[in-house]
Amino acid sequence: MSESGLSYAELHEAWPALSAGERVEGFSLLSRAAAEELFDTLDARDQLELILNMPSSERRLWLRLLAPDDAADVIQAADEEQRGPLLELLDEPTRKEVSALLAYAEDAAGGLMNPRFARLRPDMTVDAAISYLRRQRAEQVETIYYAYVLDNQQHLLGVVSLRDLVTAPSDRLVRDVMRTATVTVREQTDQEVVSHLFAEHDLVAVPVVDEEGRMKGIVTVDDIVDVVREEATEDMQKIGGTAALDAPYLQVNLAEMLKKRVGWLAALLVGESLAVTAMERYQGAIAQAAVLASFMPLIISSGGNSGSQAATLVVRAMALGEVRLRDWFRVIRREVATGLGLGSMLGVIAFGLTLVWQLFFTRVLHQPGFGEHYLFVGVCVACSILAVALWGTFAGSMLPFVMRAAGFDPASASAPLIATLVDVTGVVIYFSIAGIILRGTLL
Amino acid sequence: MSESGLSYAELHEAWPALSAGERVEGFSLLSRAAAEELFDTLDARDQLELILNMPSSERRLWLRLLAPDDAADVIQAADEEQRGPLLELLDEPTRKEVSALLAYAEDAAGGLMNPRFARLRPDMTVDAAISYLRRQRAEQVETIYYAYVLDNQQHLLGVVSLRDLVTAPSDRLVRDVMRTATVTVREQTDQEVVSHLFAEHDLVAVPVVDEEGRMKGIVTVDDIVDVVREEATEDMQKIGGTAALDAPYLQVNLAEMLKKRVGWLAALLVGESLAVTAMERYQGAIAQAAVLASFMPLIISSGGNSGSQAATLVVRAMALGEVRLRDWFRVIRREVATGLGLGSMLGVIAFGLTLVWQLFFTRVLHQPGFGEHYLFVGVCVACSILAVALWGTFAGSMLPFVMRAAGFDPASASAPLIATLVDVTGVVIYFSIAGIILRGTLL
């Protein structure tokens, strides 16, 4: 604990609940080492907030502590008009690097990479390579554990790990110990694709090259952990029927929160109003047999729930790369079989529930319940549930494919969207089935 | 491409679509190097399938290729009765290590760690330490980039990176260059907590210690990438209203898939049948004013959608550690304000939609539409939507807290569960409001 009585752990713990002013104040009370440690654990948004609220004399110091890729993230998080002044705080070579990084899309490999990596020449000896790497300071290169072998035009020839070097005879040439078959990504490669590569090959770092094979930087696995978390968060929020928040939940203000949430809800409300018009057609049937209305929540929610399940499973499988666009037919086959199975089971349960409630109403409450034709009502409900569960499962599993084929994020096939889609058609399915089964009894 | 005409890339590409037999056959056609590369990219489940389908002479070879933590994962994935024979295939020291790892919960740090890490003594010189690390082969230690300094009782004293060693004077002692303030985790620490530490501190490896501070192994960041993906997948599937699949979507057979999905759907169906009984009470009102039934899907789905949103946002924020149990009151405050805002906007839109549809029915279709009291109906719908959206938002944001406080996974507060909960109460809210507003006109 520092003399001020404020420790790293205390401030770190309280951080989410503090205002911007309190954060700067707390931060200024930390020892230099504790402040650096805390600064490192903050995300780009918090680092920016802190820097902007510091006296301008200190801003330069803290911004310069960051590696070029991290500095670029901070500047990216700033408003348009703040970016220029922030860039000015950097030293000349870093400013050039950061400006280059800012030109890449935030979610591309180019936007993630650090342009400072260890470079070797193929004709160096192992001994010379090791002593070159030993002289690299932490500010100069992201890691010395992987060194990249480049020719004079910066083309990537191979990669050599420090481990390979220290275990090789010291007079061999780098070209003879380097590995040539190495995984690379392009500057424009989407970060989700990059994260799949890391997960699949258990990579620690991956080189980023341009279309001519010239090396531009490296992406390291610690950045990928953040990418995987971010991408999953975004997908989950979309599936839940919100626009991606792009910030921690507790840090989004009310206006922003409403904006991110009302869009989908309003669109779904308008869509759901089609169900109102569909219901209009059946007002006669409902007036004749009000009992039909009672089962409506049951039936449409079964469709919505089956659809949410299917959509969520397919969206996640797509995000993990387990299911690709061309797998659509395999998925249909599986989901139709699953939908039939689920629908049958739910139909049987619903029929049983109808009987149980009927007994409860007539024997316990001495009320008419679903009326004398309750067995027909039960069959009608069971068949409708089978149909909507099958339809929900089918629609929920296919909509992500439609979204992706149309160039949208499959996660936009959200649970609420599927539920709404299935609600509207569910009403039509239910009353059509009722029209057939109950003709001559209730209708 | 090997002589057989089958390359790593071709087999890797086709892999998800192949049967177990085809996989083994394809695998046997690869060159040794390509086979090893492919084997490395497979997950534990696929590695197990491959090993079990190989001739027994080859099983030993491939199982022994794996590091102890990976071998433990493979054996963990096997059925109870296969585990013994698989363990028998390992050499004696590895068998002991793997058996120790199998005793840990799969999702605890102990289940993730590799017990083979580089150990140094504090009184070694830097020079001696480097040459000791140079002699470690890949099978002996997971990484030589981080070495752990232990006393005679295996207590962790500090950590030193290979980078620190190669840049330090060769005659200094390890104790003088090592870092002592290092992040550690306990064997029982949940993997989700471990992954938060990696994300926050940008760690590459973290030492696992027992309660007496004796070092047991290391968890490396490449395993954490998998953990983060797995945990997000599990949460997403739960939010979508399924049990966690625990396997890639296309590899779950139909019976297993039905089992994972029908549980929640059946429970929700039973829950939703409460809405049927709630509706029973209002059959009189519906028979009098069938128009009320038309708006039911609209109203209950608005509640369900607002609830799904809120639940998804809060569950994800909890998983990321952004929201903790004691933040419940801050979340209520935010969500009540958000629910009021969303509900008001949706209510106004719904009122507008009622007018638009009424005009459409009466002017275009020359039908009665919602009848002469359509303005009262519109007000009733708007007020009900405000109420259910507020209630949905409140219930959706609080249920994850209730789940966590009760010791369950907050992700079990799934979108379908919230939707069902809100449906049942939504019916009561709607008809109660209708009873007040429409008394004397329609009711």
Image (cartoon, coloured by chain):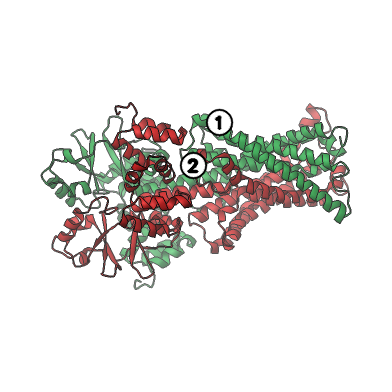
Chain colours: A red, B green
Q: Is residue B303 depicted above or below A110 in this figure? A: above
Query: Does residue B268 appear in the picture of this structure?
Result: no
Q: Is residue B50 left or right of residue A403?
A: left
Q: Is residue A292 left or right of residue A96?
A: right
Question: Which mark lies nearer to you, 2 or 1?
Answer: 2
Query: Where residue B400 sits: x, y (%)?
Result: 55, 35
Secondary structure at badge 1 equals helix
Number of marks present in the image shown: 2
Disc 2/disc 1 C-alpha distance (Å): 21 Å
Query: Where residue B252 sits: x, y (%)?
Result: 52, 52
Q: Is residue A93 left or right of residue A241?
A: left
For the residue pair B386 and B274, the one nearer the viewer reads as B386
- Residue under circle 2? A248
Q: Is residue A210 depicted above or below A273 in this figure? A: below
Query: Does residue B140 appear in the picture of this structure?
Result: yes
- Residue under circle 1? B402
Q: The residue marked by circle 1 belongs to what chain?
A: B
